Image (cartoon, grey):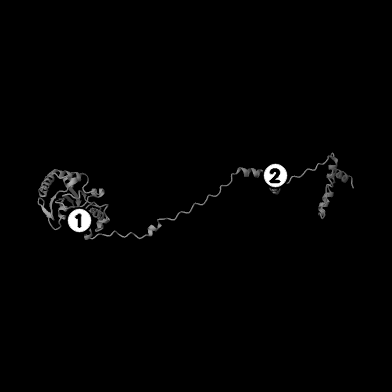
Amino acid sequence: MSRSAVFLDEMGVGPLWRLRQGAAPEAQDAVAAEPVAVEAIMAEPVMQAVPVAEEPVPAPLAADAAGPAVVAEAAGVAASVPPAASPAAPAPAAAPDDTAWFDDAPPPPPARQLSDADIAALDWDGLTAAVAKCARCDLCKTRKGVVMGRGNRQADWLMLASSPSRAEEREGRALPGEQGVLLDNMLKAIAVDAASEAYVTHLLKCRPLDEAGQERLPTEAESAACRPYVERELALLQPRTILTLGSMAAAGINPGEKPVRGTVRQLGGASVIATFHPEMLLQDETGKAKARAWADLCLAKSAHGE
């Protein structure tokens, strides 16, 4: 045994280089070529070697070829980066359109139109409902609303105009505003209370319009279509005196008969007297029409009797 091997054996180190069996010849040459390393070790002071248990290297660090510093740096970066937000849950699918069937649904059947005989059997409520959904003429295509009569349904006095105006159609009420106030005052002048003793209505329940949207006179066909409603109103009301308001109402109350102002005509058991429409009286600046209207009212009061 050589001197170096003895010292190494005493230190408990054993041979410094121990070639594995089957080592390549190049490795054997490298070991033989470095005797200086052994002599340098032997020149150092001899110290008792204390075997130190070798700590196992954690698998991730041992596997990291970049070394501990890179691993530590990577760990710090990972700690500073917030965890990626979990992907948002997909929005729920839109609920199917519950009204989609509406587009394909067949249109509702048109309201059944009453015959003249059906209308003749209606009471007041049934008559009002029938007028509201009437389609007996083409005025139902352009109207904005119907105008049913107003007042006491057991009145002795009937105020009858021709067709509704724009204001009447908008309010759904016969002779509203200044016209109604003037009519009330006219009746009051002959001791007739408009609220309790009079009923106001029209021959037509819809407003006639031309192609330009302007008011026009009703046609014979339109007047004939509405006639059953007026006759039913007369039958339910049974007035004693009918005061027609305007020339069209005077001519329409009894078709075929020419009205003459200042005379009393008969319609069934009712006396019929013609006078001016309140709208015309409001536009009368001379006062002549009002004077004639007063004469008409006095004639009506006389024909009505006590």
Q: Residue 252 lies in what quarter of the image? A: bottom left
Going from N to C along the chain, the mark reached first, 2 or 1, is 2
| Label ID, residue 305 | none
Which secondary structure, mark 2?
Answer: helix
Q: As rendered, which of 180 and 34 lies closer to the eye?
A: 180
Few, some or many residues within 10 Å of mark 2 (<14, 14–19, 20+): few
Tag 1 residue: 232
Report the Cα–Cα distance between label 2 and label 1. 108 Å
Residue 201 at least partly seen = yes
Compared across the picture, whether 125 is left or right of 8 comes to left
**Which is closer to the viewer, label 2 or label 1?**
1
Q: Would you identify the image quadrant in which residue 102 lies?
A: bottom left
**Residue located 21% across and 60% down the image:** 117
Q: Which residue is mark 2?
A: 68
Between 100 and 127, the residue placed more toward the observer is 127
Q: Is residue 192 above or below residue 100?
A: above
Residue type at tag 2: Pro
Visible in this render: residue 284? no
Residue 222, given in percent of the width and then of the height, sits at: 21, 57
Under circle 1, the secondary element is helix
